[in-house]
Each structure stands twice: as structure tokens, then as C-alpha cells.
């Protein structure tokens, strides 16, 4: 895959690379989805917002999204993406992005609800057809409590270095925001201040490199419902600073592809993964190894096989094994609930999945 195709995937129009309906000269509509059957060999659930356990689950991964793009003028456009994520009901999908963009020469300015550009696959996170696995590596993509979007502004410059290296530079800013999360049975409220970030992409022939730095301050409060109607406050932190760095690379060698990313934060993350796949026309076997460190500790290996029916539909089969270390609070690896004293901290996951775009 040459850099020109890779560049197109960073322009917040991932669906157009696969299949979209041209409603008119100005409007296009596309969609994507993911369904699966999955189970583990451990009764304690795993994976943020999916909660897969030892009984077959047919909706833990279910995703369905629609994207509408409107080219208002030669320079002005907008895009809307609504997604029924794994944790959502079909009746209450999430608005993943809704923004207004202005293109002028090599610059693009965006304002509204935007995708957080932290990782290689961030711009098409829910479009499972666009990456080899059924789910992006959890040790990277689940690290931020499932946060994938932000409200704010960004400015992108696209250019060249000596006519050989494509470059895309995007500073961005987030506005204050308040959200609630369930973290291993604890209700966590995070009230974040203005955040600032810088994303840089580099393209050269069959090489794509992504770098992001982000910094914000926040307050957090933790509580737990000990019984119906009774909430126990577990404490709060004020004016905490979060600084994140991520770097990723996608490299092709003929039919071989190597993917790797790392996420670093002084008191939270030293996570990474490396993945290799090989394309036999419609069949693509792949293997991934990943680790997470500091706030949680685990190692995992994933083996998978993908079959592309056509340019819109693919099937995957995966087996995944995780070795997790339990901390003093009973928290381990990708488990979404605390482990008891005699609980097994290793888990094997098997998944059969169908991904599609339309």
C-alpha cells in the first residue's frame, strides 16, 4: 500500500475508501458494521465496553455506523458519524463526530466534535474492515477508558519534504469536558480542563509513521454504590496533569505488513504492541504480541485469520491469550471486574466475526 492510499485514510473519510453511496453532487452516505460470536474461559469479564466472559456472547462486539458527508462549497464541507458502539443500544447510538471543515490550499481547519488522533487506527477506530484484526490491540486502544472523540478545534497542514516524504501536521485543542466512567466497578467522574495536542504523520513509499503528544489537567472523583440508594465516596484528586505520547508505524514489505505502536505516560502507561500479517490474496493470517505496564500489567498473544469475501465484507477468526498480573486491589490486565482471592488471572478468548462496509 503506497503512501497516497494511507494519506487518504487520515482525512476523516475512511468509508469512502471502501464503499459509499453518492446521494447527490454534494452528499455521500456510507456505513460500516461488525458482528461476532465470542467467549472466554474465565467467568470474570474482559475488555472495556465489551465485557466478554465464559458464555457465548453474540452482541459484545456489535457495531453499526453511518457517516454522512456534505460538500457545501469548493472549500467548505461537513461530516457526521453516528455509531452504535459495543456498549450502546441501537436506540441510543453515539455521535462520534460532527464537524465543519474549511479547506484552503494545504490547510484544513475543523471545529466541532472530532476524532482524537492518538493512534494509527484512530480515524477509523470503529471501521473494523479497515484493519486486520477484529478489535484493535486493547493494550493501546482501550487504555484511555474508551475515549475516541473530543469537542474542540484542529488545524491541519499537508505538504512534502523534498518531494519524497508526505507530511501532515495537526495541532488541536479540546474544550473542558465532564464525563463519568465505570472502572472495575468504581464510578469515576473526570472533569477535564482545556487540552492541547499535536499530531504528526509521515508517509514515504510503503512506510507510515504517526506521532501524537497531548496534555491536559483534570479533577477526578471516585465513588461506589454499596447498596441501592447508598453511595460511598472513595476520594477525589484536584488539578491532576495528564501527559500522553504515542508513536506508531505501519510498514509494508511486499505482501508482508508490520504494525507497531506504543503509548507512554509517566504515571499511567508504558504500553505497546507489535503485529505482523501476510496477504495471500483473500486470506490474511496475522499474529500480535502486546504488553501493558505501570497502572496495570499484562501480556497477550493473538493469532488470527482473515478472509476477504470482496471489497466490502470480510470474516475473521481469532484466538487470544492474556497473562495478567493481579495488583493489591484485585485489578488485573484487561479484566473489567475485580478478581477474587482464588480467581484465575489468565484468560483465553476465541472470536468469530463478520465485518463490513456499505
Image: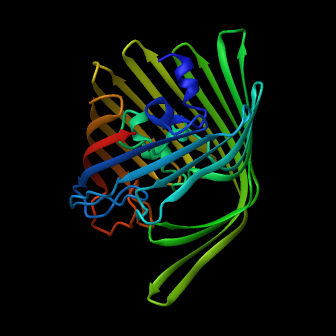
User: Which of the 4 image quadrants contains residue 86?
Assistant: bottom left
Left or right of residue 205, residue 184 in this image:
left
Give residue 164's position: percent from left, percent from top: 65, 10
Q: Is residue 248 above or below residue 99?
A: above
User: Which of the 4 image quadrants contains residue 202?
Assistant: top right
Q: Nearer the viewer, residue 75 or 150?
A: 75
User: Which of the 4 image quadrants contains residue 169?
Assistant: top right
Give residue 73's position: percent from left, percent from top: 72, 36
Give the image's coloring scheme. Answer: rainbow
Q: Nearer the viewer, residue 160 or 331?
A: 160
Left or right of residue 54, residue 49 in this image:
right
Quarter in which the C terminus is drawn? top left
| Residue displayed at 35% across by 66% down | 339
Left or right of residue 260, residue 54 in this image:
left
Give residue 211's position: percent from left, percent from top: 63, 32
Q: Is residue 131 above or below residue 173?
A: above
| Residue displayed at 51% across by 50% down | 143
- Outermost residue, bottom side: 229
Count of marks, rendered view: 0
Q: Is residue 120 above or below residue 61?
A: above
Give residue 247's position: percent from left, percent from top: 59, 33
| Residue displayed at 60% across by 19% down | 203
Amino acid at each position: 500500500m503506497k503512501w497516497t492510499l494511507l494519506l487518504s485514510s487520515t482525512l476523516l473519510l475512511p468509508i469512502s475508501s471502501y464503499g459509499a453511496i453518492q446521494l447527490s453532487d454534494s452528499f455521500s452516505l456510507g456505513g460500516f458494521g461488525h458482528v461476532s460470536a465470542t467467549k472466554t474461559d474465565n467467568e470474570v469479564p474482559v475488555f472495556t465496553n465489551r465485557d466478554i466472559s465464559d458464555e457465548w456472547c453474540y452482541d459484545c462486539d456489535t457495531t453499526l455506523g453511518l457517516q454522512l458527508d456534505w460538500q457545501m462549497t469548493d472549500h467548505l464541507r461537513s461530516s457526521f458519524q453516528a455509531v452504535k458502539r459495543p456498549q450502546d443500544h441501537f436506540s441510543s447510538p453515539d455521535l462520534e463526530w460532527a464537524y465543519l471543515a474549511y479547506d484552503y490550499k494545504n490547510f484544513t481547519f475543523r471545529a466541532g466534535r472530532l476524532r482524537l488522533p492518538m493512534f494509527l487506527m484512530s480515524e477509523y477506530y470503529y471501521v473494523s474492515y479497515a484493519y486486520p484484526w477484529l478489535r484493535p490491540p486493547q493494550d493501546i486502544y482501550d487504555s484511555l477508558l474508551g475515549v475516541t472523540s473530543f469537542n474542540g478545534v484542529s488545524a491541519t497542514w499537508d505538504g512534502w519534504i523534498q518531494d519524497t516524504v508526505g507530511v501532515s501536521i495537526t495541532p488541536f485543542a479540546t474544550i473542558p469536558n465532564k464525563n463519568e466512567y465505570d472502572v472495575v466497578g468504581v464510578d469515576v467522574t473526570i472533569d477535564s480542563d482545556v487540552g492541547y495536542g499535536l499530531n504528526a504523520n509521515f508517509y514515504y513509499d510503503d512506510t507510515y509513521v504517526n506521532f501524537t503528544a497531548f496534555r491536559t489537567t483534570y479533577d477526578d472523583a471516585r465513588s461506589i454504590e454499596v447498596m441501592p440508594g447508598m453511595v460511598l465516596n472513595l476520594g477525589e484528586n484536584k488539578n491532576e496533569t495528564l501527559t500522553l505520547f504515542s508513536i506508531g508505524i505501519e510498514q509494508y514489505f511486499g505482501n508482508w505488513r508490520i504494525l507497531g505502536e506504543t503509548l507512554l505516560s509517566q504515571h499511567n502507561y508504558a504500553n505497546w504492541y507489535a503485529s505482523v500479517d501476510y496477504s495471500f490474496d483473500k486470506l490474511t493470517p496475522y499474529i500480535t504480541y502486546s504488553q501493558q505496564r505501570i497502572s496495570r500489567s499484562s501480556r497477550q498473544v493473538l493469532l488470527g485469520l482473515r478472509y476477504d469475501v470482496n471489497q466490502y465484507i470480510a470474516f475473521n477468526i481469532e484466538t487470544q491469550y492474556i497473562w495478567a498480573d493481579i495488583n493489591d486491589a484485585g485489578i488485573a490486565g484487561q479484566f473489567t471486574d475485580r478478581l477474587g482471592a482464588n480467581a484465575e488471572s489468565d484468560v483465553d478468548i476465541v472470536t468469530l466475526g463478520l465485518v463490513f462496509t456499505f
